[in-house]
Amino acid sequence: MIQRAWRFTAALAATAVAAFTIFGSVPVYAATFTYTDPNCASFSVTDVGNGGIAVQCSRLDCAISASTLSPSSNQNVTLTASCQPPSGSTSYSWTKLNGGDASCPGAPAAGSSTTVIAPNTNAASCSYRLTASDPTFGVATRTVTLNWGAVAAPAGCSISANPQSLPIGGGQVTLTISCSGGGSASAYSWSGGFAQGQTSQQVTGTLTATTAFNASASNGGGSAPASLTVTVATGGGQTGGGNVQPCAGFANTRVLDIDWNNPQTVLSASQGGMGPNDAVVVRFTVPATAANSVSAGRILTAEYQADLSDKIGALSTTACDFSPSLAPGAMGQGTTVTENFFIGGNNGYYPSLQPGSTYFFNIRNGPNPIGNCQGGNCNLYVQLLRPGN
């Protein structure tokens, strides 16, 4: 009997059936061999000579490429399937594997190339399965996982002011919050002064006194705070008697004294008038013998020999102080400015002046002087009315 060797090379075989005839001695013998591999969609059998055969398996083999596997928080991702052997009859479908996880986007559209929309969450890890089907080469599946990064909170935030400080009397200022690191801010909040409750990145308003501001910049990842104090100058005067130092930020400082015991009207003209950028400081002292009052006294100022313009007046223990330092009601504005006060007792709004103390009624022009006040002198008269008078 003559024997033959058969060589079978089947990398992946489905069901392969081959019949062989053995030649040599008589009689002739025939043999049938069957090979089965469920992973093979189709096969072919080839005679390789010398009694050998080759079984070639054909099946669909696919890969997935992604535009990125680690997208940023708001970045969409394109998935592309590539299958071998190529066939115009292959169909593609995609399935989300995260079940009911609402943080992951739903299944992308069918097709060899599709786009996954970024989730509306800070971070998510989402898996998708490709199923490719071909009538000749079978079915192939592949899985890909996308890891969206967390939204980084803003960092390194600060507030800038333009201008950074204001002269006596204050003025307009613009505040801006900016962040040097982290993620981009999508919302802003403010507190303090005119910025209270504002929600824009930049706010503008008017200050008449030193004010602390706070702000925060935020996004889905968190928030970062910032703070800034904008100063308003109060001048360089002093308490008590002696010479009053010039008020900072003014061309001239006119000092007028009123005698509490003989309160005659005083005029700015006696000290050279009041120009558009001049300050007038009126000084008076409450005697140590003054009794607590049950009625209010007042000090007031108004223009004469000029068109009426707004004046700002503040009653203080310090010369050149234009802030309501004694009480909220110790600062006023108008063509005539009147400041009421009590001696001793405090009614909760008007300031309470103490016996034996010196006070200053500090006066400056308003923000929009008119007529002679704009280009020349705005002469003032000032009256002191003691409690009970």
Image (spheres, rainbow, N blue to C red):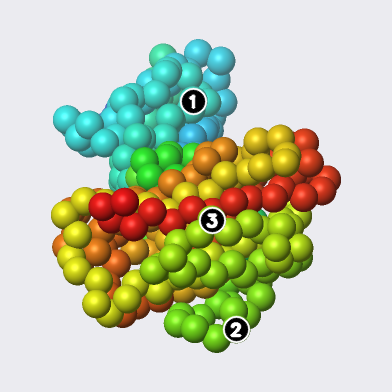
The residue depicted at 66 percent of the width and 58 percent of the height is 268
- Dot 2 surroundings within 10 Å: few (below 14), some, or many (20 or more)? few
Label 2 close to label 1 by CB (< 8 Å):
no
Q: For the residue labelled by badge 2, is the local secondary structure a helix, a strand or a loop?
A: loop
Residue nearest the observer in this picture, 12 or 113: 113
Front position among marks 1 and 3: 3
26 relative to 333 in the view: left or right: left
The type of residue carrying mark 2 is Asn
User: Residue 24: which numbered mark, if any?
Assistant: none
Q: Position of residue 86 (x, y in %)?
A: 56, 26
Q: Is residue 381 left or right of residue 58?
A: right
Q: Residue 292's spot in the image, x, y percent?
A: 18, 65
Give the residue at mark 2.
243
The residue that mark 1 highlights is: 114
Three-letter amino acid code of the residue under disc 1: Thr
Q: 326 above or below 72?
A: below
Q: Is residue 12 visible?
A: no
User: Which residue is identified by label 3?
Assistant: 265
**Residue 283: where, in percent of width, then height?**
50, 70
Q: Nearer the viewer, mark 3 or mark 2?
A: 3
Amino acid on which the number 3 mark rests in the picture = Thr
